């Protein structure tokens, strides 16, 4: 199995730290709102990587965090007049709903930053003791130039860099010794959540959170560290510097990054009016279609989201599901055991399995893996009807297994009757009148998952099938 390693800019043979086990860390979302369609790409891509590793027999420890303390969370909490934990917990639950809709498996553990503060403080103390960090008026900075290999992931020359980090300006900024030094700990501001530390009350910087959580739940050296390419610098670069300076061991052996998702050929942004949450997209398309669409291109290739391309994915997924339905019919109606002709067809099936595996083992090329599935679908459509029951069973089992690796659910949901839709809409309206918005949202999500699109208007609720 070969993986493209961002650190070396080349494909490398995958060899885990411990034989038969894989420690995988994927940077999770900052939970201040619903996840957007760009967040969905790494979730789907690296869930698929995990699924394939498990298919190959690896015991995967998959860790993906929730950043539940952040300026954006605090800002939203202030706007709503609630504690920041109310915002973070609300959107952690909403994120989990969207992940379930996308058929993203829950991580082995989803650590929350706020529950790991003690470990972050200990890591910062170690960095100070080793001369890699310093405190200035309650702020602790990482001494960037003390880590000689800074820039090795992003290939940036430290002398050419300017301070452009995500961290906000805080009290003690005048004590910063170098503009490239970044924040490990920031002092408390009025109205913000804070924790006690040797440097006064405050909270951790963003970068130290992942360094501590990956260390605690995987170890000093991660097999695969993954995320979107926008995290390469400064986040992942700073993680390397902190972790390797603290632990004196390689932080991650393989770095995987997915490329950006564009909307109709343009970068997604609120100002451009092309910013969509997964929840919004689910009102237009079943999330299984979105998952299939995301895997239709190689994860390192930029992906363009457009109605035309998603419709094409919808049709492609339907071809696969229709073939599987036909195979199930053949299992029910056909008779007998394998014939000589069936054996020949099964040899072709095994060739396609090898083609699928070769694609996945060449840096998880899901596009080519899907192409192998389509070839198998074509073969099934030609041969299953006249084959034996045993042949149909074996072909069905193989196709379902390959789809499961990609996270494709092969059981079609029963289509709701019009009367059922109307009844659910009435229940949703009643829930809204009773201000039971959780139930109203639940019904809307249930309908969206089955391709029912709701549109609220002055005349009432109108609905269509996607």
Image (cartoon, rainbow, N blue to C red):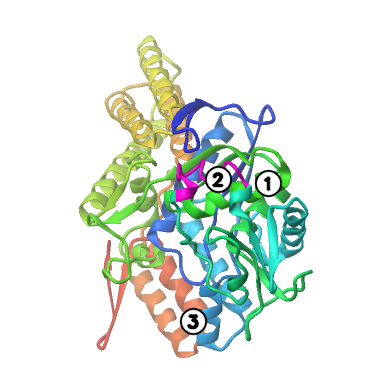
Which residue is labeled 2 in the image? 150
Q: Secondary structure at mark 3?
A: helix
Q: Position of residue 8 (x, y in %)?
A: 48, 33
Residue at left offset 33%, top offset 39%: 320
Whole-angstrom CA distance, mark 1 to mark 3, is 48 Å
In terms of secondary structure, what is the magenta stretch mainly?
loop
The residue closer to the viewer here, 80 or 246, is 246
Q: Position of residue 387 (x, y in %)?
A: 35, 21
Mark found first going from the N terminus, 3 or 2: 2
Task: Determine which of the numbered discs, if any, sits on residue 245 in the image.
Answer: 1
In the figure, 462 relative to 78: above or below? above
Residue at left offset 51%, top offset 72%: 32
Which residue is labeled 3 in the image? 437
Q: Is residue 345 magenta?
A: no
In the figure, 430 relative to 438: above or below? below
Residue at left offset 42%, top offset 32%: 399
* Residue 417 in view (yes/no): no
């Amino acid at each position: 199995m070969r993986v493209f390693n961002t650190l070396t800019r080349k494909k490398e043979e995958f060899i885990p730290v411990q034989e038969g086990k894989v420690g995988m860390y994927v940077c999770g979302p900052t939970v201040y709102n619903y996840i957007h369609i760009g967040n969905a790409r790494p979730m789907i891509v690296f869930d698929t990587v995990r699924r394939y590793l498990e298919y190959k027999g690896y015991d995967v420890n998959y860790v993906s965090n929730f950043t539940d303390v952040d300026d954006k969370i605090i800002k939203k909490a202030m706007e709503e007049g609630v504690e920041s934990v109310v915002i973070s917990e609300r959107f952690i639950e909403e994120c989990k709903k969207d992940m379930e809709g996308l058929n993203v498996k829950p991580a082995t553990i989803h650590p929350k930053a706020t529950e790991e503060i003690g470990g972050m403080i200990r890591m910062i103390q170690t960095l100070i003791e080793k001369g890699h960090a310093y405190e200035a008026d309650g702020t602790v900075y990482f001494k960037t130039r003390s880590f000689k290999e800074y820039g090795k992931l992003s290939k940036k020359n430290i002398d050419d860099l300017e301070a452009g980090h995500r961290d906000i300006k805080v009290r003690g900024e005048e004590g910063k010794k170098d503009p490239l030094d970044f924040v490990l700990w920031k002092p408390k501001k009025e109205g913000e959540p804070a924790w006690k530390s040797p440097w006064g009350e405050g909270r951790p910087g963003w970068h130290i959170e992942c360094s501590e959580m990956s260390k605690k739940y995987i170890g000093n050296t991660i097999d695969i560290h993954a995320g979107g390419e926008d995290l390469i610098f400064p986040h992942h670069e700073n993680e390397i510097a902190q972790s390797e300076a603290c632990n004196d061991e390689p932080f991650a052996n393989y770095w995987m990054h997915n490329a950006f998702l564009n909307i109709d050929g343009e970068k997604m942004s609120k100002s451009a009016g092309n910013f969509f949450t997964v929840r919004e997209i689910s009102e237009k398309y079943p999330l299984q279609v979105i998952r299939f669409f995301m895997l239709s291109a190689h994860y390192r290739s930029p992906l363009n989201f457009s109605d035309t391309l998603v419709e094409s994915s919808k049709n492609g997924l339907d071809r696969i599901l229709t073939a599987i339905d036909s195979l199930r019919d053949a299992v029910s109606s056909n008779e007998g055991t394998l014939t000589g002709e069936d054996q020949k067809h099964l040899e072709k099936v095994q060739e396609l399995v090898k083609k699928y595996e070769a694609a996945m083992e060449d840096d998880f090329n899901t596009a080519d893996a899907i192409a192998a599935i389509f070839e198998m679908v074509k073969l099934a459509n030609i041969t299953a009807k006249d084959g034996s029951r045993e042949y149909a069973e074996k072909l069905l089992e193989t196709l379902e297994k390959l789809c499961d690796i990609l996270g494709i659910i092969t059981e079609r949901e029963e289509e709701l009757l019009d009367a059922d839709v109307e009844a659910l809409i009435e229940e949703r309206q009643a829930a809204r009148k009773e201000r039971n918005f959780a139930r109203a949202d639940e019904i809307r999500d249930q309908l969206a998952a089955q391709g029912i699109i709701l549109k609220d208007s002055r005349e009432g609720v109108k609905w269509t099938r996607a």
